[in-house]
Amino acid sequence: MKMELIQPFINAADAVLSQGLNSPMEIGNLTMDKDAYRLKGVAAMIELTGDIEGRVIFDASPTTAAKIASHIAGTELPETDSLVREAVCELANQVIGNAVATLNDQGFHFRVHPPHLHTSEHGPKITGDTEALVLCFETSSGSVFMNIALRYGGSAANSVSA
Amino acid sequence: MEQFSPIKRSKDGQAVRYLIVDDSVFARKNLARIIESFGGEIAGEAGDGMTAITEYERAKPDIVLMDITMPQMEGIESAEKIVQQNPDARIVMVSSVGYQENIVAALQRGARHFVQKPVKPEVLYEVIKYVLGEDGVVAAAAGAGA
C-alpha cells in the first residue's frame, strides 16, 4: 500500500476525531497485519470500489465507543445503546468520506459503499485481505483502530504500475 | 453546546422549520441538537431520499438538511425531485463526501449550499443565514439587552 493512499485517511481521522471529541489525538501504533482481523469491539466496515479498491474498518472497544458516542451526543449513553453502534458507523462514514473527498480531488474515482456494522460477539474475524495497515489513534476517550486494506484497481492499477 | 442567537422567519417571527434527512439516526440526532441551538424547530426527519420527498410535501419545511449517501435514493437525486416540485425549496447538502464533483452536481441539481461533515455548528449557522437571506432574521439572544 502506498502512503499516498493512507495519508488522507490519517488526516481525516485526525480531523474528525479531534473535532468530535474537542481534544487532540495522537497516532499510536502502526502495524502491518497479514492475518484475519480480530475485532476490538464495535466496528464499522466500509468497502470501496473503483480506481481504489478494498475496505476500511473503524473499530473501538465497547467502552471507548460508548464514551465517544456520549461525548458527541452530549448525553451519557450505555454501551448497550444502539446509538453507540450508530455513532461508530457515522464516525467511520465521516472519516472515510473526508478521505475519499481528498483522493477524489487528486483524480481517483471510486464508490463508497454504506457501512456494515460488526461486533466482536457476532463476527470476531474478518478475512479476505492479504495485507492491512492497522493504525491506532489515542483519543481522550480511549484507543480507536483503523484497519486499512486498499489497492489500486482498474485503470489506476495500470497507470500506477506503468 | 454553544447557544446561538435564534434565527427566526422574518415573515412571522416564528422558529425556522427544518427537515433532516440522513440514514444515520445518530447523525440526525446530532443535527437536531445543533438546529435547536439555533432556535430552530424540527418539522420532520427522513432516513432516505424517497421518504424525504414525501416528508417535504407533508411538512413544507423552511430548510432541508440532506445527506448524500443514503439507501434507496441518494440525496442529490432526492434534492432534484423536491426542487422540481417546489422551486423555492431551500436544500443544504450535509455530507462527508465533499469532493468537487459531488458539490457541483448537488448545486446544479437544485441544492442551495453544501456543508461538510463533521458539521461545525458555527459554519452551519452562517450557511442557514445565507440560504434564508431576507426570509430569515437573527433575533436577539434570550436575556440580551436586559
Image: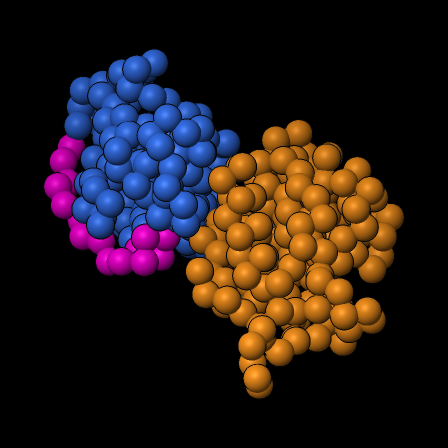
Residue B143 sits in quarter: bottom right
Q: Which chain is blue?
A: A
Please tell me whether residue B96 is drawn above or below residue B10 in the rendered image.
above
Q: Is residue A26 visible?
A: yes
- The residue nearer to you, when weighing B13 against B135, is B13
Q: Which residues are magenta?
A: A18-32
Residue at the spot x=71%, y=62% of the render?
A: B15
- Residue that lies at the very extreme toward the front in this rendered image: B146
Q: Is residue A4 visible?
A: no
Please tell me whether residue B6 is drawn above or below residue B60 in the rendered image.
below
Describe the colour scheme in one phrase: by chain
Colour representing chain B: orange
- The residue nearer to you, when weighing A149 against B87, is B87
* Left or right of residue B94: residue A60: left
Residue A86 sits in quarter: top left
- Which x, y percent locates residue A140? 22, 50
Residue at the spot x=14%, y=45% of the render?
A: A28
- Which x, y percent locates residue B58? 82, 42
Residue B41 sits in quarter: bottom right
- Which x, y percent locates residue A49? 46, 32
- Residue that lies at the very extreme toward the bottom in this rendered image: B145
* Left or right of residue A23: residue A100: right
